[in-house]
Image (cartoon, grey):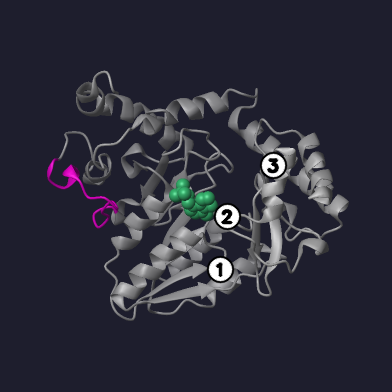
Amino acid sequence: MEGEPVQFLWRRYEERLEPSRFELAKFIGARPRDVVFVTNATTAINAVIRSLNLRRGDELLTTNHDYNACHNVLLEITRRAGAKLVVARVPFPLKHPDEVIDSILKLVTRRARLAMIDHVTSDTAVIFPIAQLIRELEARGVQTLIDGAHAPGMLPLSLRKLRPCYYTGNLHKWVCAPKGAAFLWAREDKQADLQPAVISHGNNRPRRGYTAFQDRFDWAGTFDPSAWFCVGEAIRWMGKLLPGGWPELTERNHSLTVQARRILCERLQVSPPCLESMLGSMATIPLPERFQGRPRTGRIDSEQLRLYDKFRIEVPFNRVGKPEKRWFRISAQIYNLLSEYESLAEALKLV
Ligand SMILES: Cc1ncc(COP(=O)(O)O)c(C=O)c1O
């Protein structure tokens, strides 16, 4: 890129972008024409919500399990429009996926324009039943925006079958593409009204062979597109790590998560907050009683800092629920071993 910037960023840009988009589309069960790259899920959520043209009195729906940055987008845009943000209270611990569906559907009114639903929640690490939610919400005239930041590479995806209005996923998490690689998929009937978070040349520079949707999103001002160009290779490379390809990789990560959670819950004498079938390759686990009720000490809890400094274990701590409870979240990728979670159980006794 630095050696021949015009060649890399301009003359031969599509030559590198298209194979990557093609591989990604195959991976997420979509047509390449419906998929664009963005730098991250936050950017995609901004694009969708800022394109809505909300009116006073309109409602946007989300849940209390949503991701703070995305929640802020909904808050700001509803505030500006005089619209209302309706937050469904999904319990945690969760006994059954039906609790997610019920708590969301009971808040749908005739004024609901769009619901933002996480595919895999961030703090609580549960898989939401999005297929049923998309069907039920769309049947009630509510547009669906799925925040799948954690889903690609953790769960199999077929957007052709799911058909929400919009779906975004990060590729810099479970697909292991470089940071700055994510996508936005939009159903064909929603593409005309969709503008990127950063408007650039595409609005009046159509390219032969591309949709207007792709023209608008494919260039967001000068930046390093290497992460986007690498996505196809990341998908192929990860898919070759095990003989059974991606299905074996995701199944391995899921079963390691389940085993790790069992061990940790047993050693720490805490109860798992959801069914194993609601887990992908992350799990949120309650911290033992002696950690509870301690006030925040800074942006990162002191015990999390000590886990890293003393034991080189990186594991996020968070606070969820009312009354607030403290939890930690584990993840399992191909490079993790069960023994690492056993070490975590021991280390948690010492921090
Ligand atoms: C559910 C969810 N949405 C959105 C994001 C934001 O992703 P990014 O920072 O890549 O935009 C995350 C990140 O962890 C997430 O878990």
Region in magenta: 191-205
Q: Position of residue 104 (x, y in %)?
A: 54, 71
Q: Could you tell me how far apart the alpha carbons at marks 2 and 3 are, in whole angstroms?
A: 24 Å
Q: Earlier in the sequence, mark 1 or mark 2?
A: 1
**Callout 1 amino acid:** Asn
Q: Is residue 16 left or right of residue 275?
A: left
Q: Position of residue 146 (x, y in %)?
A: 46, 56
Residue matched to label 3: 309
Magenta span dominant secondary structure:
loop
Viewport quadrant of the N terminus: top left
Q: Earlier in the sequence, mark 2 or mark 3?
A: 2
Q: Is residue 120 magenta?
A: no
Task: Tell me what residue is drawn at x 87 percent, y 57 percent.
Answer: 269
In this orientation, which residue lies closer to the viewer: 160 or 170? 170
Q: Could you tell me how far apart the alpha carbons at marks 1 and 3 are, in whole angstroms?
A: 32 Å
In this orientation, which residue lies closer to the viewer: 320 or 233? 320
Q: Could you tell me how far apart the alpha carbons at marks 1 and 2 are, in whole angstroms?
A: 11 Å
Q: Is residue 31 left or right of residue 254?
A: left
Residue matched to label 2: 122
Residue matched to label 1: 64
Q: How many marks?
A: 3
In this orientation, which residue lies closer to the viewer: 109 or 175? 175
Task: Mark 2 and ligand 1: say if the CB distance to the nearest ligand atom is below 8 Å.
Answer: yes
Q: Position of residue 212 (x, y in %)?
A: 21, 45
Question: Mark 3: few, some, or many residues within 10 Å (few <14, many ≥20)?
Answer: few
Query: Tag on residue 237?
Result: none
Query: Which tag is nearer the camera, tag 2 or tag 3?
Result: 3
Query: Which tag is nearer the camera, tag 1 or tag 3?
Result: 3
* Label 3 residue SS: helix
**Callout 3 amino acid:** Asp
Q: Is residue 209 left or right of residue 238?
A: left
